[in-house]
Amino acid sequence: MARAADTRDRILVAAADQFAARGFHGTATRDIARAVGIRQPSLYSHFATKQLILAALLDADLVPALDRVDRALALDGPCAPRLHAWLHADVDAILSLPFDVRGLYDDAALATPELAEQAARRARLHERTRRLVADGVAAGEFDADPGFVGHAITGLTLEAVRERSTGGAPPGRGLPVADFVLRAVLADPASLAAVRAAAARLRPLLGPAVS
Amino acid sequence: MARAADTRDRILVAAADQFAARGFHGTATRDIARAVGIRQPSLYSHFATKQLILAALLDADLVPALDRVDRALALDGPCAPRLHAWLHADVDAILSLPFDVRGLYDDAALATPELAEQAARRARLHERTRRLVADGVAAGEFDADPGFVGHAITGLTLEAVRERSTGGAPPGRGLPVADFVLRAVLADPASLAAVRAAAARLRPLLGPAVS
DNA sequence: GTCTATAGACTGATAGAC
DNA sequence: GTCTATCAGTCTATAGAC
């Protein structure tokens, strides 16, 4: 046991935990190594630099997230059930990751050239989230500012992650987040029950149904 | 010119900017000093430790915020207009601070004994926000989980701050945030217009009307 | 792949002249 | 209150034995 790929994964999980608690800059490679049970220089058998640990974690979060939003954008039918199903699946998927994404989005670290690819992925993710909302506004289903709602979704998702990390039990937050956003943006609030029912049928297409 | 109190304030603003960009641990006292235009040891004429700079910034954010939520809790009348007016005033007040609060809430730093007082203030603020929502649920005005809505408000507020820092122009986000939350929690969505009108009369009691 | 040893830069904070 | 000089500790990353 303790194969190389195993150690690599344990480094990633330990690094994410420490980044979440103290930030990227506040985490020493010695701290990560200690949590894994190896010496600090041994990390460099798996990652050439500390920044590449962060890049691997960002990709593990961003690549599946981009796939989910692309699938939601590609679905047919009205926007409201697609937004609801996507939010539900997206938040549950992020909360079910084996590591904590909270410390990954360090704006200064993402601004460095080494992480340009990850920064571009993140910008693409935000742009597509905004488009999902804007489509619904254009169709008359939503009454909202897409830019603001995009930021609101980001804030709600990050806070759900923060809640899991700092609080006790990790609850199924996907459904509450989806309900909260849809209630806030639906032009016809009375249609929420129908939207939820339609979203339940779409969700299996967007990812595992966790809650 | 350049009196002592002046330099102290400029240290606080510079420190907040750097904490927002690189986090508390990622910011060197030399970086703060350079932004102020003094040498690194000169900082210690104004603050005994780096942590006390963070404590002063946290207090400048938390003490007025506690005052605002206490005034909202003390008001008479239904909960919905009070929640709307408080959210509007609170977000606008935070966005109009002369410094960036985004980097202040480092969980690991707040957990140290030196910042216990600030951590307690923050917990009190969260508890009172939750109570403002719970009162409305008990009165039948809201249909929501107060714990979840409390976290949602935190996430929306932090994202509004992040948006100001990373994006370009700082828009008046207090009203959109208040509308977003009220639409999401009101048991009777049709009452939003009346709630907004009543909130507009309360808002002058909670702080400056920025937008 | 992991180890010990260490390089070289940077960290927060102090001492003492002005 | 600001400065120069500096200390002791920590940081990421490398070299080379096993």
Image (cartoon, coloured by chain):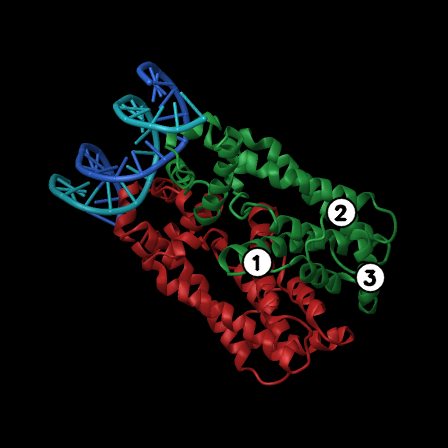
Chain colours: A red, B green, C blue, D cyan
Q: Which residue is mark 3?
A: B197
Q: Which residue is mark 1?
A: B170
- Does residue B52 appear in this view? yes
Circle on res. B206: 2
Left or right of residue B204, residue A206 in this image: left
Residue B94 x/y as whole percent: 62, 48
Marked residue chain, label 2: B
**How far is the residue under mark 1 from the one under mark 2?**
21 Å
**Circle count:** 3
Three-letter amino acid code at the position of disc 3: Ala
Mark 3 or 2, nearer chain start: 3
- Please rate how many residues cluster around mark 1, counting C-alpha atoms within 10 Å: few if below 14, some from 14 to 19, many from 20: some
User: Residue at the location (63% across, 81% down)?
Assistant: A138
Three-letter amino acid code at the position of disc 2: Leu
User: Residue at the location (88% across, 51% down)?
Assistant: B77
Residue B195 x/y as whole percent: 82, 61
Indicate whether B109 appears above or below A172: above
Left or right of residue A198, residue A123 in this image: left
Circle on res. B51: none
User: Residue at the location (60% across, 60% down)?
Assistant: B171
Q: Which of B152/C8 is in front?
A: C8
Three-letter amino acid code at the position of disc 1: Pro
Indicate whether A171 appears above or below D1: below
Give the quarter of the figure containing the C terminus of chain B: bottom right
Disc 3 on helix, strand or loop?
Answer: helix
Mark 3 or 1, nearer chain start: 1
Whether marks 1 and 2 lie on the same chain:
yes
